[in-house]
């Protein structure tokens, strides 16, 4: 399909398998990152999104790891969209992401560029 795709919107939710077991049990970190990297290698423009969930993937260390992986594997010009989590469905008990964490993640990404 690569010749027919212009862009891939991908999600890197975490760099931890524990996160995927808890939140997205159908995937592992290696599967997610491997498919994203393969798309990039096939010449598909990749844009990565991380929905920052309080208490799940919102530590500065976690966000730094994601930003570094994107830079190291997709290039420093590859877009990283950091989005705010809003409580819904099975995570309705989790509060929305504070703006300060989104601002911190954005600063982390810019620092690496």
Image (spheres, rainbow, N blue to C red):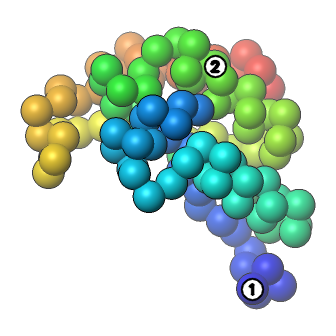
Q: Which residue is drawn at 73% across and 79% down?
A: 5
Say left or right for 103 vs 67: left
Quadrant location of residue 18? top left
Q: Residue at x 87, y 68 (%)?
A: 42
Say left or right for 45 vs 99: right
Position of the N terminus, as image quadrant, is bottom right
Q: How crowded is mark 1: few (under 14 residues within 10 Å), some or many (20 or more)?
A: few
Question: Is 94 located above or below residue 75 in the figure?
Answer: above
Which secondary structure, mark 2? helix
Q: Residue at x 31, y 23 (%)?
A: 54
State whether residue 15 appears in this view: yes
- Residue at far left of view: 93
Where does the image place residue 59, in percent across and percent down from the top left? 46, 15
Say left or right for 24 vs 32: left
Position of the C terminus, as image quadrant, is top right
Q: Which residue is drawn at 55% across and 48% down?
A: 28
Where does the image place residue 20, in percent across and percent down from the top left? 44, 42
Question: Is 18 located above or below residue 7 in the figure?
Answer: above
Which secondary structure, mark 1? loop
Quadrant location of residue 4? bottom right
Where does the image place residue 94, in percent across and percent down from the top left? 18, 30
Q: How many marks?
A: 2
State whether residue 83 appears in this view: no
Quadrant location of residue 77? top right
Residue 64: mark: 2
Residue labelled with disc 1: 1
């Amino acid at each position: 399909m690569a010749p027919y795709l212009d862009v891939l919107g991908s999600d890197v939710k975490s760099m931890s398998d524990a996160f995927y077991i808890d939140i997205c049990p159908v995937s592992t970190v290696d599967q997610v990152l491997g498919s994203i990297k393969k798309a990039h290698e096939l010449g598909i423009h990749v844009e990565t999104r991380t929905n920052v969930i309080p208490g799940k993937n919102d530590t500065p260390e976690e966000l730094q790891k994601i930003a570094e992986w994107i830079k190291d594997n997709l290039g420093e010009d590859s877009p990283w969209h950091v989005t705010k989590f809003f409580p819904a469905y099975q995570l309705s008990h989790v509060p929305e992401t504070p703006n300060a964490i989104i601002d911190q993640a954005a600063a982390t990404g810019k620092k690496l560029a």
